[in-house]
Image (spheres, grey):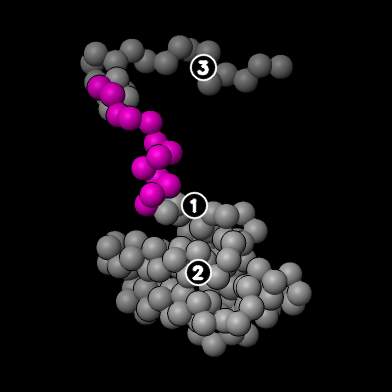
């Protein structure tokens, strides 16, 4: 993952946090990290490969948590944070990855028209 794409993903996450009214300092930290990544004269993935995560956390404005997030982005291509182990997908990737909602998929188990799962659905077989 090159620096411009990495910076874009960090900004997308900052927007995600901002929309969910997360801590303003955290939002700013992701924006600042995007700026730092964008201004680097060498690829972040190369810095990581040559010197490890400690080199990332030594960059101005990038601490241990952001270094972890950046490393995970580079290593897996997915967004993982120390605060939230669930991955964050960029908005354009989410839209293409979810199946279209159907009336059947939006019913709940409490819906009287919905049949419960078969009894053996959750049983373990030997």
**Is there CB contact under 8 Å for labels 2 and 3?**
no
First along the sequence among labels 2 and 3? 2
First along the sequence among labels 1 and 2? 2
Q: Which of 84 and 120 is in front in this view?
A: 84
Whether the magenta-drawn stretch holds residue 38 is answered as no
Whether the magenta-drawn stretch holds residue 99 is answered as yes
| Residue drawn 32% across the image and 25% down it | 105
Rounded to the nearest angstrom, the CA distance separating label 3 from label 1 is: 26 Å
Identify the residue under disc 1: 86
Q: Is residue 63 above or below residue 99?
A: below
**Crowd rating for badge 1 (residues with CA inside 10 Å; few <14, some 14–19, many 20+):** few
Q: Which of 42 and 57 is in front in this view?
A: 42
| Residue drawn 23% across the image and 16% down it | 112
**Crowd rating for badge 2 (residues with CA inside 10 Å; few <14, some 14–19, many 20+):** some
- Answer with the quarter of the image where residue 28 lies: bottom left
Q: Is residue 9 above or below residue 55?
A: above
First along the sequence among labels 3 and 1? 1
Identify the residue under disc 3: 121
- Answer with the quarter of the image where residue 52 lies: bottom right
Query: Quick one: SS at disc 1?
Result: loop
Q: Where is residue 57 in the image (x, y as percent from the top left)?
A: 61, 80
Start-end of magenta stretch: 91-103
């Amino acid at each position: 993952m090159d620096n411009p794409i990495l910076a874009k993903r960090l900004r997308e996450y900052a927007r995600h946090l901002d929309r969910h009214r997360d801590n303003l300092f955290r939002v700013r930290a992701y924006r600042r990290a995007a700026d730092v990544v964008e201004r680097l004269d060498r690829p972040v993935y190369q810095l990581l490969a040559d010197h490890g995560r400690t080199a990332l956390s030594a960059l101005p404005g990038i601490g241990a948590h952001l270094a972890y997030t950046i490393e995970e982005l580079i290593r897996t291509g997915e967004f993982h944070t120390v605060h939230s182990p669930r991955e964050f997908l960029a908005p354009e990737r989410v839209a293409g990855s979810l199946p279209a909602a159907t009336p059947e998929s939006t019913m709940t188990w409490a819906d009287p028209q919905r049949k419960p799962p078969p009894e053996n659905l959750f049983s373990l077989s030997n």
